[in-house]
Image (cartoon, rainbow, N blue to C red):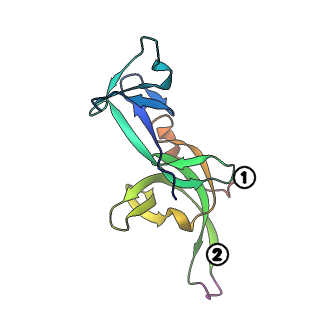
């Protein structure tokens, strides 16, 4: 059975909620330490971005979520072609409606299936590290 998990980005406080609680009416979110304490709730509908877990982990055992920026290797060329080669790629993880799966975005559109990546590594996310998408991917993942 696949594990269905989410994390959330709180826009108001610029905070990533790895573990969180949603109130009983389903419209507000708080850090999991809310029990018995006054806490900072954020409006779930407009102030929070939910990101789904892909079900995959990177080469270091880090869970890969939507919104993560990954660096990986990818095969290019036909499988039996003599010039087939591995090249480094980098992009953010997003849901691809056309394939009903997660993809790596390149220039704002789904480009590579996340399951085709070799040695993926999470290097940040689009909310806390937006500058990562501006940098070129030139070297092989470490």
Q: Which mark is residue 142?
A: 1
> Residue 7's x, y, as percent?
46, 38
The residue shown at (31%, 28%) is 24
Q: Residue at x 67, y 49 (%)?
A: 61
Given residues 141 and 83, the one toward you in this image is 141
Span highlighted in magenta in the image: 79-83
Sooner in the amino-acid sequence: mark 1 or mark 2: 2
Q: Of helix, strand and loop, which one carries label 1?
A: loop
Neighbor class of circle 1 (other Cα within 10 Å; few <14, some 14-19, many 20+) is: few
Q: What element does badge 2 sit on?
A: strand
> Is the residue 80 above or below the residue 106 in the image?
below
Q: Is residue 29 above or below residue 71?
A: above
* Residue at x 62% of width, y 88% of height: 80
Q: Where does label 2 land, which residue?
A: 85
Quadrant housing residue 13: top left
Q: Is residue 134 visible?
A: no
Verify whether residue 55 appears in magenta. Answer: no
- Please state the horizontal and vertical placement of residue 128, each as a whole percent of the image: 49, 34
The count of marks equals: 2
Q: Is residue 109 left or right of residue 118?
A: left
Q: CA distance from mark 1 to mark 2?
A: 18 Å
Residue 123's mark?
Answer: none
Magenta stretch secondary structure, dominant: loop
Whether residue 38 is visible: yes
């Amino acid at each position: 059975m696949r594990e269905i998990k989410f994390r959330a980005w709180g826009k108001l406080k610029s905070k990533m909620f790895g573990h969180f609680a949603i109130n009983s009416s389903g419209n507000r979110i708080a850090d999991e330490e809310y029990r018995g304490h006054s806490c900072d709730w954020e409006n779930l509908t407009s102030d929070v971005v939910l990101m789904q877990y892909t079900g995959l982990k990177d080469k270091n055992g880090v869970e890969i979520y939507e919104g993560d920026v990954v660096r990986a290797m990818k095969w290019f060329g036909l499988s039996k072609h003599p010039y087939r080669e591995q090249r480094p790629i980098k992009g953010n993880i997003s849901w691809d409606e056309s394939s009903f799966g997660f993809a790596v975005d390149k220039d704002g559109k789904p480009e590579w299936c996340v399951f085709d990546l070799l040695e993926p590594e999470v290097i940040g996310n689009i909310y806390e590290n937006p500058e990562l998408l501006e940098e070129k991917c030139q070297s092989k993942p470490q």
